[in-house]
Image (tube, rainbow, N blue to C red):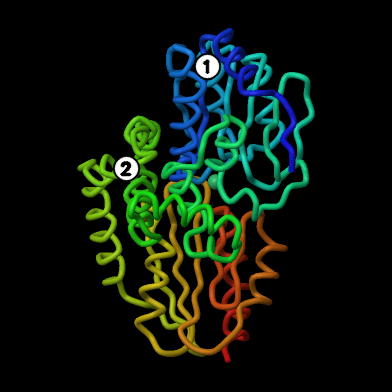
Amino acid sequence: MTLAPPALDELREKVKAAGNTLLVHHWDTDGICSAAIVEMELFEATGTPLPKRFTPPMGNFFLTDPEREEIASGGHDLVIVVDMSFPPRDILFMADQAGSVVILDHHVGPLIEDPRVEHLNPVVKGDSQDNNPATTFVVSRYLDRELDLLSVLGAVGDLGKKLRKSPEVWAKVQRVMDEHSEDLETVQSAVDLIDSSYKVGDRGGVTAAPSIVKPCGADLSDVRTFGQWAENLKRIDAEIDSVLERPLKDLGSGLVMLEMDTGMEIISAVTRKLAWSRTEGASIVYNSKPGPNDQVYVRLSGDGDLTDAVKWAKGRLASAGGKKEVLGAVVPKEEREEFMSELVPKVQASLG
Ligand SMILES: [Mn+2]
């Protein structure tokens, strides 16, 4: 697929002319590495002062009033959004504030058609998700940059082992990893370090992270030696262990439930550990986390098929998903009771 303008030079001119840019990026490895690439190619390459970085409160793929106020008070004349698919109303709000928005992304969503918005996302223009495994790949294409370990970090962060399923992309990823004597496992452990900032709920750590990863296009040692991230991983492991010591509720028919209230992003790891410690039935983990939404995860230990339950949850909530052996959903706090009273029998019915 050929990419439409603007050419790199036009983007650089836009950045230089703006002067006061806000760089909004996703809190995960792909968002952090994409932000680093954007800063190097559009700002450092043109001698333009670096943008102010911003990530929404983790878990929010939209803006609430405090973020709107923060953006409005910044006096920005350009907003660049990387690796986040905001609702159109939030993008238009940014355009109202700054006059100009550039989006670099690979998420599925509506094409935003507004003269003030440059929406650079091959996927919303009809290209496949397989061709665009990460925003690091998208920015590399638009910013005319060879794929490097930063691009690979983004792709491994978003897709992990699933990268092997698209042969073309996997070949590119492998070539870069081979060049630098890395493999999927070693890159994944670097991703775990970078993702640890959002997993412990450290928003400031997330917006500081692009500076740490910038030298990592050819060498991941700056990721591996950044002490805060190693420290975060220890805290995450300790939190998982302590949560798993809590008493389980027996819901009957082979289903057990663990309730927790943590601000750390550990529910998928906790559910996996719990489910794998049992030989049959299923485990539900419910996190009453700080903020307006809770999280729930379900995982099978033995036979069963959660596909129908996943379908039902997707029809019921804005954010739900899963597959045969796992279900995950974001539950607005006020919907907890009703949702759980319907979910439990659905899971029990899906056990083999
Ligand atoms: Mn991404």
The label number, if any, that marks residue 219 in the structure image: 2
Mark 2 or mark 1: which comes first in sequence? 1
CA separation, marks 2 and 1?
29 Å
Circle 1 sits on which residue? 21
Foreground: 229 or 351? 229
In the drawing, does residue 96 fall left or right of residue 256? right
Amino acid type of disc 1?
Answer: Thr
In terms of secondary structure, where does tag 1 sit?
strand
Residue for point 53% across, 52% down? 172
Q: Is residue 176 visible?
A: yes
Residue for point 48% across, 14% down? 46
Foreground: 58 or 50? 50
Q: Can residue 263 be seen in this view?
A: no
Amino acid type of disc 2?
Answer: Asp
Residue for point 51% across, 38% down? 146
Q: Position of residue 103 (x, y in %)?
A: 63, 30
In terms of secondary structure, where does tag 2 sit?
loop
Q: Position of residue 169 (x, y in %)?
A: 57, 55
Please name which of the two marks, 2 or 1, marks the residue nearer to the observer.
2
Question: In the rendered view of the protein, which quadrant contains the C terminus?
Answer: bottom right
Residue 244 vs 229, above or below: the answer is below
Q: Where is residue 107 in the image (x, y as percent from the top left)?
A: 64, 46
In the drawing, does residue 137 fall left or right of residue 179? right
